[in-house]
Image (cartoon, rainbow, N blue to C red):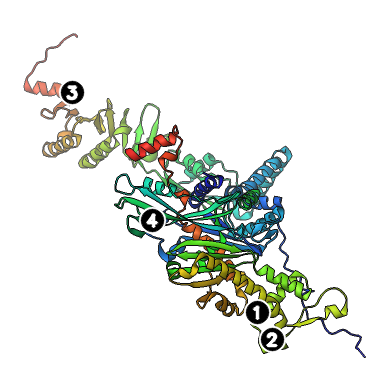
Amino acid sequence: MTDLYQTQRAMRNIRRAAMQRGVVAILDIGSSKVGCLILRLENADGAREMDGVGSMAGQSSFRVIGAATTRSRGVRFGEIAVMNETERAIRTAVQSAQKMAGIRVDHVIACFSGAEPRSYGLAGEWELQDSVVSEQDVARVLAACDVPDIGEGREVLHAQPVNFALDHRSGLGDPRGQIGNRLSCDLHMMTVDASVVQNLIYCLKRCDLELAGLASSAYVSGVSSLVEDEQELGAACIDMGGGSTGISVFMKKHMIYADSVRMGGDHVTSDISKGLQVPLTTAERIKTKFGGVHATGMDDREMIEIGGDSGDWEKDRRQVSRTEVIGIMRPRVEEILEEARARLDAAGFDHLPSQQIVLTGGASQIPGLDGLAARILGQRVRLGRPLRVQGLPQAATGPAFSSAVGLCLFAANPQDEWWDFDIPTERYPSRSLKRALKWFKDNW
Amino acid sequence: MRPLTAPRRTVPSQNAVPRRDPAPSRTAYRMQRLWLTPYIRTALRVGLPAFVLTFGFGLYLADDTRRDNLSSVYTDLREKVKNRPEFLVKLLAIDGVSPDLAEAVRTTLALPLPQSSLDLDLEAARAKIAQLSAVGDVKVQIQSGGVLQVTIQEREPAFVWRDAAGIWLIDDTGTRIAEITDRNDRADLPLIAGDGADQAIDQAQQILTSAGPLLPRLRGLVRMGERRWDIVLDRNQRILLPVNQPVLALERLIALDQAQDLLARDVVAIDLRLQARPSLRLAPYSLAEMRRIRGIIPAESDL
């Protein structure tokens, strides 16, 4: 078992402690903004007793009581580049969210977009000893999955059993208690760069926060912005963030593929900055105010003062037409979408029954993006916003917050992962006390 | 030619400073988290002010002169309020008693008037007045206009009681009211005598009420041996009543008297103590005369 595996198990316990306390912070560490939401979890125990996810897709079990967002510092491509700066950004966001909530949070669930996620599909098979599937059998079939070589310095971030099959019956959600001979499972494993995760853990530790969960932002933004039937029938969520664009493919309510393109809205900004010779802040303003991907005749006449602070009259009086801005932006946006298309093709997205594509994330707010995306990604493209959760401020309901909202849902109803299942008895050290206890538990 | 004045700058980018979003220092961050910790918050919001208040107050009171000042301020204030004319009692009014008793009450109370009503202890004054034997019930109240109103219900003397110590007026409960020098001071009241007469006043009352025809001759009642009554009539005639049911015996005697004119004869005492056998004691002369008439020669004895 790897280091992160142990960390993930420990994080589950911390998460349980946070549920008991009833307050947990959600931290979305992005390249352009760091957002912090504070959730008050209601009937934390009662939620476990309910069947399924409960009313309002499980959102009734929590409420956002504090929300803050701050300009991100020291994060590039969704990875921490400058530890001190990132720590400051996290402190800013956490402090103002705490101030709004009026409560102190110690447990935080974080998501990040970078660290080069890679997806693996794993399969395992297990012959049942007695014909009824027990929890140990589930554990053994998960342990029987042959793990590919994930490479040096990489860690498993998500490992979710996607499908169980018993003999010839496939598509079982929960095989426990069913009768058969041969149990097999499919596991989706997502690995990330270990050093990035370690940096993140260290950074949160320096903020006096305890990490109660870690998720990929591509996954959680898919959770929040895909509607139920899209998740069921197969859809891809493209989360266009500042520094990187996350891609996640959902099928039968499970993530079956995740990837990321290391390009995002910041690259568009820097293109404008370079093309128009303006500072990045001005370029960002021009992008958000006048940006677009389809130029029309009207745009030729719309002149934008781009200014400058050089003192040189000629330079400070510059004007560009909106068409020029669009002309700078469009190739980059196209490039991002094409790259995403390539990733989806490589993953075999066109074999899915439904090929819905949902664009979300801050960069998906470029006017006319859906038209452009439809030409590159196929006809079934829509712009997605995160679904509404209780107590979320109006300012935080845009597509830029889809990963934060998704992380709320993830915190309230986490997907069972590999480390949530029992460890097979054989895997315990032979003289372990735990093994003896386990034997007693199983046999008495 | 180009104008010297530049066109108005409409680009706000130079003026628009990006929103300041300064990161809190690590100390500020920790202090804020500490402040948001519930028990620390409670301690600081409740505990600290309470402590400061208590400590400061204690520190202030630790000095003797300050304590004295405080107490003197308090007493001054009390004095000032107490001595206001609204609270002054200037007059003691005693109602419902004879002048002697009123004088007795005045001397007993010995109130230095005028005095503030806040200093008066009405309960104690009432107890003091109630101690006087002539006082049956007493009400003490302060009325407007600075009057201390004492309303006394005097005990009503019912008997004159003569015992070894002197002559007393007692009421119908047997309580001594006052001493008098002469029985004739209260000739209207019946006389009783003997030890323990005051314990059996009820019986004496009943005997007196049923002694109707005897009343003109009645001199008094004597309590004998603290258990029964003798009726003393003029000419030193005595009627010895029994311990039990004296009234019944008396009524019988009255009937006898009315029938046979018993009491008019020369009888010294009528002994009714034995109900079945009332006996008469004749006067010595009458006895001898009766014997002579009957021809009974008594055996003379030297003894």
Residue at numbered disc 3: B285
Spot the residue most to the left: B295
Query: Is B104 placed above or below B278 here?
Result: below
Can you give x and y, in whole percent of width and height, for residue B286 in the image? Answer: 16, 25
The reply to whether dot 2 and dot 1 touch (C-beta < 8 Å) is yes
Q: Chain of mark 3?
A: B
Q: CA distance from mark 1 to mark 3?
A: 160 Å
Chain letter of the residue beneath label 2 in the structure image: A
* Residue A164: mark: 4
Q: Could you tell me if the residues under marks 3 and 4 are in contact, i.e. CB atoms within 8 Å?
A: no
Rounded to the nearest whole Å, what is the CA distance between mark 2 and mark 1?
10 Å
Image check: A217 left or right of A168?
right
Q: Are marks 1 and 3 on the same chain?
A: no
Q: Can you say whether A428 is above or below B88 in the image? A: above
Q: Nearer the viewer, mark 4 or mark 1?
A: 4
Q: Report the side of A260 relative to B265 (left or right).
A: right
Residue A95 visible (yes or no): yes
Same chain shared by disc 3 and disc 4: no
Q: Are marks 2 and 1 on the same chain?
A: yes
Which circle's residue, 2 or 4, is located before the other in the chain? 4
Earlier in the chain: of badge 2 and badge 1, it is 1
Crowding near the residue tagged with mark 4, few <14, some 14–19, many ≥20 C-alpha atoms within 10 Å: many
**A54 vs A150: above or below:** below
Q: Disc 1 residue type? A: Gly
State which chain disc 1 sits on: A
Q: Which residue is mark 2?
A: A299
Residue type, numbered disc 3: Tyr
